[in-house]
Image (tube, rainbow, N blue to C red):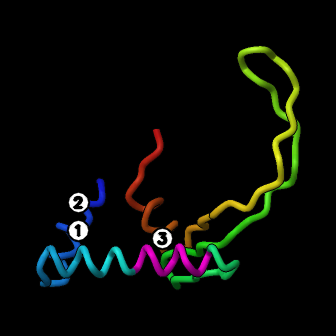
């Protein structure tokens, strides 16, 4: 599912136009991104948590030359699925 498919599904489920659904989703994504960029944690009960995580500096390898390089410390966005989200996925997914 891409953003267009998501907009269509939200518009149908919420009974709003596709344009309104697009505006709402865009506002939601921007708000979450802005909060996480400021170092805040965004928790949506039943869905999950978005938060910034710090990665330490580490060593890596240049795949072309095999040379050891230093990968600098950085902050990355992270998502942890909530309990209800995990339960819904495990109930619908059958591992064979």
Q: Residue at x 52, y 85 (%)?
A: 45
Q: Residue at x 34, y 74 (%)?
A: 26
Q: Position of residue 76 (x, y in %)?
A: 68, 60
Residues at marks 1 and 2 touching, judged by CB atoms closer than 8 Å: yes
Q: CA distance from mark 1 to mark 2?
A: 5 Å
> Mark 3 vs mark 1: which is more N-terminal?
1
Q: Residue at x 59, y 81 (%)?
A: 35
Query: In the displayed image of the protein, which residue is found farthest to the top?
Result: 65
Q: Is residue 67 left or right of residue 83?
A: right
Judge by depth and name the residue closer to the eye, 23 or 47.
23
Task: Give the quadrant of residue 73.
Answer: bottom right
Q: CA distance from mark 3 to mark 2?
A: 22 Å
What stretch of residues is rendered in magenta?
28-36
| Residue linked to disc 2 | 4
| SS majority, magenta | helix
Q: Residue at x 62, y 75 (%)?
A: 36
Q: CA distance from mark 3 to mark 1?
A: 20 Å
Secondary structure at numbered mark 3:
helix
Give the foreground label among 3 and 1.
1
Q: Position of residue 62 (x, y in %)?
A: 77, 24
| Residue linked to disc 3 | 85
Mark 1: give few (<14), some (14-19) or many (20+) Cα within 10 Å: many
Q: How many marks?
A: 3
Secondary structure at numbered mark 1:
helix
Judge by depth and name the residue closer to the eye, 61 or 14.
61
Secondary structure at numbered mark 2:
helix
Q: Is residue 64 left or right of residue 8?
A: right
Magenta-drawn stretch contains 68: no
Q: Is residue 68 left or right of residue 1?
A: right
Give the foreground label among 3 and 2.
2
| Residue linked to disc 1 | 7
Judge by depth and name the residue closer to the eye, 23 or 45.
23
């Amino acid at each position: 599912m891409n953003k267009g498919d998501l907009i269509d599904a939200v518009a149908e489920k919420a009974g709003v136009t596709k344009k309104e659904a697009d505006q709402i989703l865009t506002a939601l994504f921007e708000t979450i991104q802005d909060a996480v960029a400021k170092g805040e944690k965004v928790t949506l009960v039943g869905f999950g948590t978005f938060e910034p995580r710090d990665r330490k500096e580490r060593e890596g390898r240049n795949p072309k030359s095999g040379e050891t390089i230093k990968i600098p410390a950085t902050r990355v966005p992270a998502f942890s699925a909530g309990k209800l989200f995990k339960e819904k996925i495990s109930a619908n997914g059958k591992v064979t």
